[in-house]
Image (cartoon, helix red, strand yellow):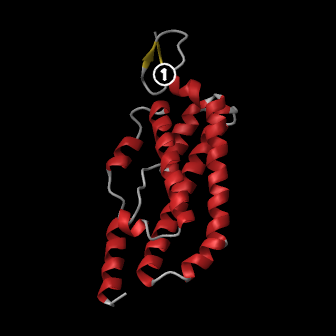
Amino acid sequence: MSTRASGVVEPFGAVPFGQKLAGSDAFKSLFKEGMYLVELSAAYLDGPGRLEAKALPRAVALAYASESMRLTTRLMQMASWLLMQRAVNEGEMTPVQAQQEKNKVKLSRQDLSCDFETFSTLPEVLQDLCEQSLRLQSRIIHLDALLYPGALGASRLARPVAIESQLAMLREAFDARGG
């Protein structure tokens, strides 16, 4: 038996599934998908999305702003994690260094900030980008849990996002103004 850096005991010669997956073609595909989604989202939000947002009613525009910020944050967290893991796979960073850096990445589950009814009023492209990012986020969080069992990530997943209360106050303020 041998003990991994995480303290998990493995049979001699056994490679944990998460490590094998992280170094596989499946990870390379996940990496490409994540980076493509970042580029696609940036192009939309900086171009057509900006124009679409200006034409939305006030309440929907608030939801658009909230979801686009949430999308951007979600994608940046995932891109940081993917880049860090790629560095480990390519030997540019050790798993121990990655564990230390991982605490800076703050990979956490970020769901939609609005209810389904409001979300369905947003431009279809934004809806699609959000849905794709949520699916990708689930896959990355699952891989993260396999690679770093018992890490701080599990406690972050259970914590409510602080921005939720701020968004609720913004919604109330807009509703009070008749928007």
- Does residue 160 appear to the left or right of 78 in the view shown? left
The residue shown at (55%, 58%) is 129
Picture coordinates of residue 39 (x, y %)?
A: 67, 57
Q: Secondary structure at mark 1?
A: loop
The residue shown at (41%, 43%) is 153
Quadrant of the rendered image containing residue 92: top right
The residue shown at (46%, 44%) is 138
The kind of residue tagged 1 is Arg
* Relative vertical location of residue 63 with respect to residue 40 in this rendering, above or below: below
| Residue hosting label 1 | 4
Picture coordinates of residue 110 (x, y %)?
A: 43, 55
Quadrant of the rendered image containing residue 112: bottom left
Task: In this rendered view, identify the residue nearer to me: 177 or 10.
Answer: 177
Task: In this rendered view, identify the residue nearer to me: 53 or 80.
Answer: 53
* Relative vertical location of residue 152 with respect to residue 5 in this rendering, above or below: below
- Does residue 87 appear to the left or right of 72 in the view shown? right
Picture coordinates of residue 166 (x, y %)?
A: 35, 72
